[in-house]
Image: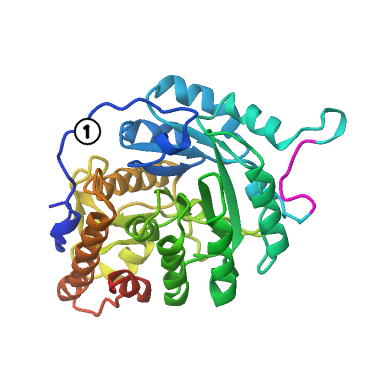
Amino acid sequence: MMFTVIDNPSTAPSTAFVAPRPVETGDALALLPNRQFHVSNVNAAGEAPLINASAGGLFLVGDRAPKTIEQIRSDNPGLPLILEPRAMRKYWATEDKPFLLPGGLFQSTLDGELDWQRLDSDLAITPTGQIRVGDSATLKAALREANKLDRSDMMLALPMASGWMNNEQHVKQLIAVINRSRHPVLLTFTSSSNPVGSARRAKAYRRIFKETTAPVVAYRTDLVGFDAVAHGALASAIGSYPSLRRLTPVGGRGFAMDPEVKSPHMLITDMLRFVRSTHMRRIWFASAASIQCFCVICRGADIDRLHGEPHERRLGHNHNVVTIDHLYSSYRDLDEAGRRALWARQTAGAIDTHPQLAAHINQPVPVDNVLKVWASAS
């Protein structure tokens, strides 16, 4: 049992032995399957050692990532490390220029840019800019240019505006384009808040992974990545804090909340939700004993104990890394049917934890509509 107060037996971590696994560098279809990936930025050096190298991997993001990857690799030689291209965060794609390539005296080609990435990264990612809602011409241009390349060490990045999931025809078109890709697709959505935060979008997101036939990685996501994996995704990559669980639109910023905005969102695996420490202290446990967590980071401490100081935030993010891996541990080596059945049990159990918590704190705990979608039959 990972937590006091609540219990979802289906989310208990597996204790099965994980055999040592090499880093299948340069081979996307060998490296990506049967791993749980994480997305990290400023705390990458602290999070990398927490990841089981034979069952996980790390996407490094941010302007400093190319400068830190060498040291992180030296300290964690068996862990797959992949660099996110700056274009995904900083560039709007256009039909004429779907990729951000160096210009000037040393004009680069897409193939050459991917070669440069591979000097540091175990796989290369197309430097695709963000694609606006309904801009099918740019989406097709990115696919067309990537399909010209005959390489096994790359992924086609598709950073899509979240509004693509609002429209039936846009969803169909996105699925059709992905299915024409020669390369695994790294799919993510942009938003200033949770891009898959409504039932409508959660259904569209699931549909994409059910209906695509090309290999797709659910990238920069939250626990909806598990829904994707249960419905056909090759893998998911989950961020340790909110801004890494989405792509913010170019030039935009996420929403600020209150003076304690920096207190960490803590993953409660039994409930399948991230909850901010502030919310738990102020709302859930203002008049009741807190949930205690027994992961290797918390070691029986209260789940709501952390505030906004940098060292406390790092602890919260580290907790998220290890608990995401706990949740994934039972998915290893399952086929898609097995993963879907496990997800069904976990989501049903998560709904059951809400009345358990409500009884403890003597107030209602609403079930999020997205969790209801996850728990619904495929």
Q: Is 283 on the left or on the right of 132, as rendered? A: left
In the foreground, 180 or 62:
180
Residue at the farthest top position = 74
Q: Secondary structure at mark 1?
A: loop
Q: Quadrant of residue 113?
A: top right
Q: Position of residue 88 (x, y in %)?
A: 63, 48
* Kind of residue indicated by mark 1: Val
In the foreground, 193 or 371:
371
Q: Residue at x 35, y 38 (%)?
A: 56
In the foreground, 305 or 328:
328
- Would you say residue 43 is visible in this rendering? no
Q: Residue at x 44, y 38 (%)?
A: 29
149 inside magenta stretch: no
Looking at the magenta stretch, what is its main secondary structure? loop
Quadrant in which the C terminus is drawn: bottom left
Q: Position of residue 200 (x, y in %)?
A: 46, 77
| 319 to 46, vertically: above or below | below
Q: Is 162 on the left or on the right of 376, as rendered? A: right
Q: Quadrant of residue 311?
A: top left
Binning the other alpha carbons within 10 Å of mark 1 as few (below 14), some (14 to 19) or many (20 upward) gives few
Residue indicated by mark 1: 18
Give the magenta part as a residue range.
96-102
